[in-house]
Image (cartoon, rainbow, N blue to C red):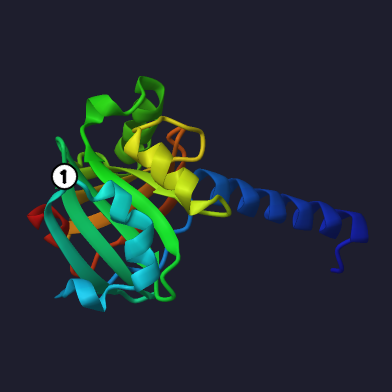
Amino acid sequence: MTMKPAVLDIMKYRFLLFGFVFLMVFPVLSQNKYEQETRIQKGEFPAQSLELITPYLEGAKRLRFYVETDSLKRSFETKFKKGKLHYSIEFDEQGSLEDIEFIIQPNDVPEDSWNKITGMLTSRFGKVRIKKIQQQYPNGDKKPEKVLKDAFQNLILPYINYELIFSHKGSKGYQDYEGLFNADGNLIKLRKSLPANYDHLLY
């Protein structure tokens, strides 16, 4: 029996609507992250990148430079401690600023945003162990000088993100994940870390 065109159109509409709702409620897991960091000398770091951040390195401790390679890209990163905060500043292969991050605690995240983040993690994974939280200032299309100023003033602005490293115990044991959330606590990206590289904790 041949279905009428109107019935086919309704079924097609319902299928598309279901697909859209599914993607909105359950964001697609991004490509797995295989990350490797290699420490390099200061002279191997891009000159233009070093010039940009030099004013912010005064008084910095444990200053180190890295080249980072993962399954998606190659980049340069510097890490240091200034005051009570541990910073990491990342540049792309051409030396352009990508983002600035520093480690924070759960109570540093606005309450509404944190509740949304933890609510999403609970609904999707159940119990998780949060290993690290970073406040991220992505460069995007902004001027690098402004992003640096915002980050080192620790400003809570609409364009910042929160990056979480957490683990979840599944049927095959513990698995590490990296989740990126916007300032409101909405999930932007989620991917497995294989294997997880926590050299970030060493600086």
User: Which residue is the site of mark 1?
Assistant: 59
* Amino acid type of the residue that numbered disc 1 sits on in the rendered structure: Gly
Res. 130 image quadrant: top left
Q: Residue 161, how many percent across, how many down?
A: 41, 42
| Above or below, 194 relative to 44 | above
* Number of on-image labels: 1
| Residue shown at 34% from the left, 33% from the top | 154
Tell me if 103 is positioned left or right of 179 in this view: left
Q: Position of residue 123 (x, y in %)?
A: 35, 37
State the residue at coordinates (38%, 37%).
120
Residue in the picture at 20% in, 42% down: 128
Q: Using a 10 Å C-alpha cutoff, classify the residue at mark 1 as few (fewer than 14 neighbours), some (14 to 19) or many (20 or more).
A: few
Name the residue at the top extreme: 111
Residue reaching furthest to the right: 5
Q: Quadrant of the C terminus?
A: bottom left
Q: Is residue 145 visible?
A: yes
Task: Classify 69 as above or below 166.
Answer: below
Quarter in which the N terminus is drawn? bottom right
Would residue 35 be seen by someone viewing this image from the given angle?
A: no
Residue at 47% across / 58% down in the picture? 28
Q: Is residue 94 left or right of residue 192?
A: right
Q: Quadrant of residue 34?
A: bottom left
Residue 149, by quadrant, is top left
Q: Position of residue 111 (x, y in %)?
A: 35, 21
Label 1: which secondary element: loop
Q: Nearer the viewer, residue 79 or 116?
A: 79
Q: Residue 112: x, y in percent?
A: 40, 22
Q: Is residue 156 left or right of residue 1?
A: left
